[in-house]
């Protein structure tokens, strides 16, 4: 970005338009901050609920808990809503809170560089450059699919795609399909596609624990009641929240208490899988909760079908049309579908953010992701993350954590306004280290660290930098206010204000299904 180039400047630039980005935009408006933009690389808002359009895609958190408290939806059609309903909800929130003029679609952030002289971020995007006093990164950990490097995959003559980039133009009917992975996406995909494919081969490195899914249609009477008496929606949400708060102790302090849940999961399997050999393949050897607990009533019945094979080994090699497992099992297939997760602990956006010392966020996190209260990073002034390190949950709704972080963001902006002028806040290294030490000390007792599994919660060093080891109430308390003693404050000399060019693209995106 040339030093003399006149570019647009905004108070806040938000990256991403999923729950984190849309929530941040709403909160900024409610705080009176209207000089902001939301930069979205895709052609519509929605984040992961726009991108994941695979067959059977749905949420495993109850609908009334998986929505913003400030935007209740009395018309959820099911207790566990599908992808299309959640995507519609986010579109409606963007309209209800008049966010469209702030949203820049098809605008990918290519690089973020901190300008220490001007105390602002230089932002290079695919549609032009701009600067911002504050950047809110809401790209989310489930935005960039991870596909393993499989020898020979580039020579496969058939179709290959990731679950988060589903190819709706490719017809699976009558095909021989390899499904790689047994995570949350795979257990929803398998029951759907097995109805149409000629043969389905599931490559399973580690079996998941699967509990029954208490899903049902929400009656018209219930929806009418929620519309007429809004407090009933709040009460329903409160009950769902409270039940999950009560479960946290078992995950974080007393994992041995999860044995009863394991027995329920085993009975769920035994009802559908009568073959002892198949049951043996599908029975986990680690404590339930160590990996994400999955919910399904149709996964086990699908695996018991005669045209479905379960290979208790990961995919190791591709030889032409033959896929080969690590245990030597081979299968001829026409298509390979990867349900292998996302870049969670190595988010690509971190390679594009250059901080005050000239190093990227990825370099700063080379020994593991660390932040202050899941939000701010030492050496990266006025840079705020939504769903940052150690803010994930294993048993409740991420929207609760996002809203807590939005409280912190709101107070962060208030503190900058109180300081006045051009100013920057950067968390002290000592504060980040102290916070991270407390989190990791608490993590030692949790099921995620003691349960005997290797999960996507752990980074390359085996450290859990993903999950929050406490209740959502504890996190909300910890992020209620910004403690300025944890920050270094930098002020710039006052100068005469210059007119700032502003442009705002108002466009209502087409709600076409994403198939990229």
Image: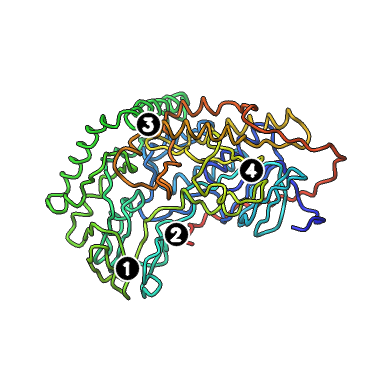
- Which residue is disc 1 drawn over? 317
Can you identify the residue that label 2 sits on? 165
Q: Which numbered mark, 4 or 2, is in the foreground of this view? A: 4
Alpha-carbon span between mark 1 and mark 4: 41 Å
> Marks 4 and 2, how far apart in space?
32 Å
Q: Visible in this render: residue 102?
A: no
| Badge 2: residue crowd in 10 Å (few <14, some 14–19, many ≥20) | some
Above or below for 231 versus 105: above
In the foreground, 298 or 211: 211
Give the x, y percent position of residue 512: 51, 57
Instruction: Tell me, yes or no, if residue 40 can be seen here.
Output: yes
The reply to whether the C-beta atoms of the residues labelled 4 and 2 are less than 8 Å apart is no
* Disc with the residue nearer the chain's start (1 vs 4): 1
Q: Are marks 1 and 3 in contact (CB under 8 Å)?
A: no
Q: Count how many numbered circles sit on residues in the image.
A: 4
Q: Position of residue 127 (x, y in %)?
A: 67, 59
């Amino acid at each position: 970005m040339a030093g003399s180039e006149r570019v647009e400047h905004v108070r806040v630039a938000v990256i991403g338009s999923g729950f984190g980005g849309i929530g941040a935009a709403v909160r900024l408006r409610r705080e009176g901050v209207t000089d902001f933009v939301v930069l979205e690389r895709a052609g519509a808002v929605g984040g992961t609920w726009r991108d994941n359009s695979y067959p059977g895609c749905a949420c495993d958190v109850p609908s009334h808990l998986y929505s913003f408290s400030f935007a209740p939806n009395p018309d959820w059609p099911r207790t566990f809503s599908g992808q299309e309903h959640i995507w519609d909800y986010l579109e409606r929130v963007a309209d209800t809170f008049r966010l469209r003029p702030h949203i820049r679609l098809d605008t990918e952030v290519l690089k973020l560089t901190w300008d220490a002289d001007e105390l602002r971020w230089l932002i290079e995007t695919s549609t032009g450059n701009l600067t911002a006093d504050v950047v809110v990164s809401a790209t989310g950990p489930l935005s960039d699919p991870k596909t393993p490097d499989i020898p020979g995959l580039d020579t496969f003559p058939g179709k290959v795609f990731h679950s988060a980039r589903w190819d709706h133009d490719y017809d699976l009917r009558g095909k021989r399909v390899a499904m790689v992975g047994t995570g949350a996406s795979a257990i929803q995909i398998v029951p759907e596609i097995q109805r149409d494919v000629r043969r389905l081969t599931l490559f399973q490195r580690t079996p998941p624990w699967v509990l029954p899914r208490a899903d049902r249609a929400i009656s018209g009477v219930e929806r009418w009641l929620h519309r007429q008496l809004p407090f009933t929606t709040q009460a329903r949400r409160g009950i769902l929240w409270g039940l999950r708060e009560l479960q946290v102790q078992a995950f974080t302090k007393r994992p041995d208490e999860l044995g009863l849940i394991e027995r329920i999961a085993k009975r769920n399997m035994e009802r559908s899988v009568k073959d002892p050999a198949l049951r043996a393949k599908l029975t986990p050897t680690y404590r339930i909760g160590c990996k994400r607990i999955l919910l399904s009533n149709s996964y086990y019945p699908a695996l018991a079908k005669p045209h479905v094979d379960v290979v208790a080994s990961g995919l190791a090699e591709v030889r032409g049309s033959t896929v080969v497992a690590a245990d030597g099992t081979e299968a001829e297939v026409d298509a390979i579908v990867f349900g292998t997760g996302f870049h969670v602990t190595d988010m690509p956006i971190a390679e594009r953010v250059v901080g005050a010392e000239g190093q990227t966020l990825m370099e700063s996190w080379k020994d593991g992701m660390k932040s202050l209260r899941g939000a701010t990073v030492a050496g990266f002034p006025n840079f705020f993350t939504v769903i940052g390190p150690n803010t994930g949950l294993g048993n409740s709704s991420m929207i609760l954590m996002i809203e807590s972080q939005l409280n912190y963001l709101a107070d962060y902006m208030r503190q900058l306004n109180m300081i006045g002028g051009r100013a920057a806040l950067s968390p002290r290294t000592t504060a980040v280290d102290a916070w991270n030490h407390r989190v990791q000390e608490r993590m030692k007792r949790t099921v995620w660290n003691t349960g005997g599994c290797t999960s996507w919660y752990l980074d390359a060093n085996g450290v859990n930098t993903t999950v929050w080891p406490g209740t959502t109430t504890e996190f909300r308390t910890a992020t209620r206010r910004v403690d300025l003693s944890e920050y270094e404050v930098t002020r710039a000399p006052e100068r005469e204000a210059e007119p700032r060019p502003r442009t705002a693209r108002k466009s209502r995106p087409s709600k076409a299904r994403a198939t990229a």
